[in-house]
Amino acid sequence: MTYNKASCLKLPVELVREISSLCDRGPLASLAATHSHFRSPAQEFLYEEVAVKIGDNFGTRTMKLLKTLAENPELCGWIKSFGVVHEKLEDGMPLKKEHSQSVIDMLRTILQNAQRLRELRVLLYTEENDWVRGLEDIFYSSMHPHLRAMYFPLGVDYLQIIRAHPEMAMLGMFIPHKCEPEKRIDPYVGQLLREVKKITYVVDSLPSMPIIFAFRNEDSSDYFIPGYGTADEDEDDGLEVLSDDFVEEFIVFPWLVPHHAKDIFLDQVQDFMIRDTLYMKKDLETVQRVSIFDDQSLEADCLRSLSHELSAFCPGAYCAQFHLQHKYDMEHSEVEQFLKDWSTNATEVHFKMWPDMDGKTRFFAEPLSDRVRAKLVESLGTICPNLFLGTIDGYGFSKTDGWFRLSVAEADEDM
C-alpha cells in the first residue's frame, strides 16, 4: 500500500489536472481530501462553477457551501462562474433582516476574492433587505477584469455595469413574473425600458457593447418571490433552482445588438442561457412569448431577419409581439412576412406601440384605413387563417370574431 501511494504521488501535476478535469463533483471532492498533492488540482475544477440557493438557515448543503467559501478565500480564487438565487420559503415570508445581512456579508467576501470570475448570475429578489444595495458597489466596480457575462434582476443600474466592464460580452436582464397578465399595465416592462433608454442615450460614447437581452420566467407556485420558479433540492442531482425550466417571455432590442454579433446573436444567447452545470437551465425552445422592441432606426430587413430566426429558435412560442416607435413605417408586405414566420406555431401576433415608462399599453390614435384592414384580412385568410392579429391602433382580428376593439384599448380611452 505504501508503494502504491508513493507511486501516485509521483504523478505530474499536469496529469493530475487532466484527470481532475474529467471527474464529476463527487470524485473531485474525494480526490481533494485524499492528499495535499491532489488537493489544488481537484479544487480548481470542484469550485470552477458554483451555484448557491439562499435559504433561511445555514443547515442546507448549499448554505454550508456559502459559509465554506466565505471562510476560505483561497477556494473563491478558483471560481469562474457564480450563481446565486433565493429559495422558495414555505411560510411565504421574506428572510429575516439579520440573516439576510449575514448572507450579504458572505456574498461580498466571496465576490471580492473571486478574481477569476467570468460569469455572474445574481437572481435575488430586490424588494426586501437591500440585497442590491448591499452588493451593488461590487457590481459597479472593476475588480473582476475577466468578467464577460452577467444575469441581473431589475433594480440594478445596467449602464453602470456596462461602463465598469467594457470587455463584457453578455448582459441578461431578469424580469419578475407578471402576476396579473390581464391588466393593461406591466410596471416591470416600464422599468426595463427606462434602463434600455439610459443605455440608448449614451451608446455612442461606450467603448463597446455587450449583447443585451431580457427574459421572464413563469411561476407556478401560489407564493411568489419575483423572478423565481419552484425550488427543490435533490442530494443526488444537485440543485434544481428552477423546476419549471421554461421561459415565459424572451425580449430583445435589435438596435442594441453589437454589429459584430448580429449574425450569431441568438446562438450566443442560447449558449449562455443553457447551463446545466449551474442548475439554471433555460432553453429558447421553451419560450412562451417573444417580444421585440424595435427602434425606428433599425433597417426593416434586419427586423425581418431577426423575426424569422426567432420563430425558428422559439418553436414553442404561442405569441409574438412587435413593439414599434411612433414614426415606424411598415409596408404591408413586411406584415405578411412576419405573419408567415409565426404562422406555424404561434396563435397570436401583436403589433403595438412601445409602452410608456409606467408600463401602460399604448396604441396609435389614428385608426388604420379600411383598405389596410381589408388587405390584412386577405393576408390572414391566405397565410394563417387561424392566427389572431392585434394591430397597432388597438384592434384585433380573428376568423371567428372578425374585427373588434381590444379591451385594453377601450380601457385606455376611459383614462
Image (spheres, rainbow, N blue to C red):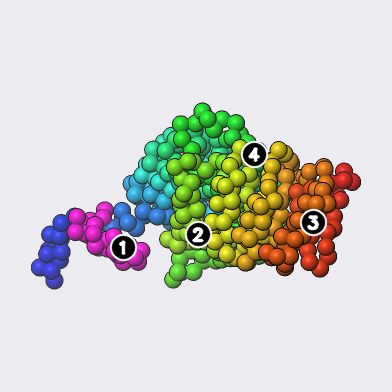
Count neighbours of disc 1 (C-alpha within 10 A) and say few if under 14, some if 14 to 19, many if 20 or more: many
Q: Give the foreground label among 3 and 4.
A: 3
Is residue 204 part of the magenta span, yes or no?
A: no
**Cα–Cα gap, marks 2 and 1:** 22 Å
Q: Amino acid at mark 4?
A: Gln
Residue at which label 1 appears: 28
Mark 2 or 1, closer to the camera: 2
Across and down, in percent, residue 66 comes to 45, 53
Q: Residues within 10 Å of mark 2 (few under 14, many from 20)?
A: many
Near-viewer residue (348 or 66): 348
Horizontal relation, residue 399 to residue 266: left or right: right
Which of marks 4 and 2 precedes in the sequence?
2
Q: Amino acid at mark 2?
A: Met
C-alpha separation, residue under disc 3 versus residue under disc 1: 67 Å
Secondary-structure class at tag 3: helix
Which circle marks residue 280 in the picture? 2
Q: In terms of sequence position, does the residue under pointer 3 or pointer 4 come before the other? A: 4
Of circles 2 and 4, which is in front?
A: 4
For numbered disc 2, what is the local secondary structure? loop
Q: Nearer the viewer, residue 94 or 208?
A: 208
Does residue 329 appear in the picture of this structure? yes
Q: Which mark is residue 296?
A: 4
Q: Are marks 2 and 1 in contact (CB under 8 Å)?
A: no
In the rendered structure, which segment of residues is drawn in magenta?
14-41
Label 3: which residue? 374
The vertical placement of 351 against 156, above or below, is: below
Give the image location of residue 128, x and y in percent: 64, 46
Outermost residue toward the top in this view: 205
Q: Nearer the viewer, mark 3 or mark 1?
A: 3
x, y (%) of residue 53? Answer: 52, 57
